[in-house]
Amino acid sequence: MDDLRDKYIDLIANAGDEASLEDLRVQAVGKKGEISLKMRELGKMTPEERQIMGPKLNALKDEINTALSAKKEALADAALNERLKSEWLDVTLPARDARVGTIHPVSQVIEEVTTIFADMGFSVAEGPQIDTDFYNFDALNIPGHHPARAEMDTFYMHRAEGDNRPPHVLRTHTSPVQIRHMEKHGAPCRIIAPGRVYRADYDQTHTPMFHQVEGLAIDKDISMANLKWVLEEFFAAFFEVKGIKTRFRASHFPFTEPSAEVDIQCSWEDGQLKIGEGDGWLEVLGSGMVHPKVLQAAGVNPDEWQGFAFGMGIDRIAMLKYGIPDLRAFFDSDLRWLRHYGFASLDVPTLHGGLSR
Ligand code: PHE
């Protein structure tokens, strides 16, 4: 019996894992285990023998069971320690660099533009990117035969035969938001409408999808002078150049009369573009006094109300402000480009904190 005891105590002490320990348990005290078989032999013994062997065997069984559960616990502890060691983590290390993702220059510039115009009392309006040709063209005084329709390189939505809903287009400019806003809210109003627009065009300065911000201010006595002041205030704040010069060139849009294209002052020296100095000019937007027919189409009485509108290219002013040479890269989703030109996500532009930290 002592041999049996020594054998199992030794085997248990040397068991390497819980599975081999379980094998030992079956071998020793399982139903057909060595010790269990010995206990069965008790029946064949004389009462005297049984009185000695019975308690001895029971004590042996208890001792083996105790050794088994002690070893089982020790193995579990060791396994846990091993796991804790491999999953060890230093929680005092600095957090991961917060700039793993960045704000796209277009989103940044929309925030900046919104901040500046909000300060002048403009609120933000929105319209659908898929719109009817009525809102994109007719209501803006661009009838079906007008060359502007062709010039805009419009994407038309597919129409199944027999579909008699009005034709839909991907909006070619943000000007339809003028109509939708006045239809719903009437006059007076003072809004900007930033968003995506679409034209079938692709080269270094054109992509089929790009961004514009529309401006619209309607009241009893709004004039071109107000337009000029608002835009000059905007450019000075946006480009962070006090007294930046603008040039208004007579132009033509079907939805404004008179119309002007607006340039901002710049210099080109040693291939370096600087905004707000020198005697060069860069075109940045179209504008004018809202055409009476446009007011009428939107349900606003042109004998009572008047005002200005403008449409500015967001990607273009982003390229100018942040020195980004190729428009196409804006929409390539190249992580290296995004990390280079992107903005930290918590640096929300504010007028007091600076627009472009
Ligand atoms: N919608 C014009 C364009 O996309 C810009 C514009 C808007 C001009 C408002 C005048 C007034 O080119």
Image (cartoon, grey):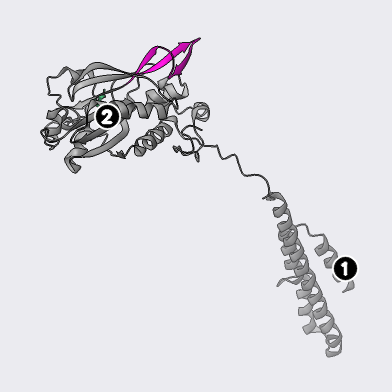
SS at mark 2 in the image? helix
Residue plotted at (40% across, 27% down): 236
Q: Which mark is residue 226?
A: 2
Drawn side of residue 20 relative to residue 108, left or right = right
Q: Quadrant of residue 47?
A: bottom right
Type of residue at label 1? Asp
Is-magenta flag for residue 283? Answer: yes
Look at the image and give the residue range highlighted in magenta. 264-284
* Ligand 1 in which quarter: top left
Is-magenta flag for residue 336? Answer: no
Question: Is residue 3 visible to us here?
Answer: yes
Type of residue at label 2? Asn
Task: Report the front residue among 4 and 322.
Answer: 322
Where is residue 226 drawn, in percent x and y?
A: 27, 29
Secondary structure mostly seen in magenta is strand
How far apart, in angstroms, are the residues tagged by discs 1 and 2?
A: 103 Å
Where is residue 13 drawn, in percent x and y?
A: 83, 63
Asked if the residue at label 1 sits under 8 Å from ligand 1, the reply is no
SS at mark 1 in the image? helix
Q: Which mark is residue 6?
A: 1
Question: Is residue 314 visible to us here?
Answer: no
Q: Which mark is residue 89?
A: none
Residue plotted at (27% across, 34% down): 129
Asked if the residue at label 2 sits under 8 Å from ligand 1, the reply is no
Where is residue 321 drawn, in percent x and y?
A: 44, 24
Residue plotted at (23% across, 16% down): 250
Crowd tier of the residue under label 2, counting other residues whose Cα lies within 10 Å: few below 14, some 14–19, many 20 or above: some
Residue plotted at (10% across, 33% down): 303
The mark that comes first in sequence, 1 or 2, is 1
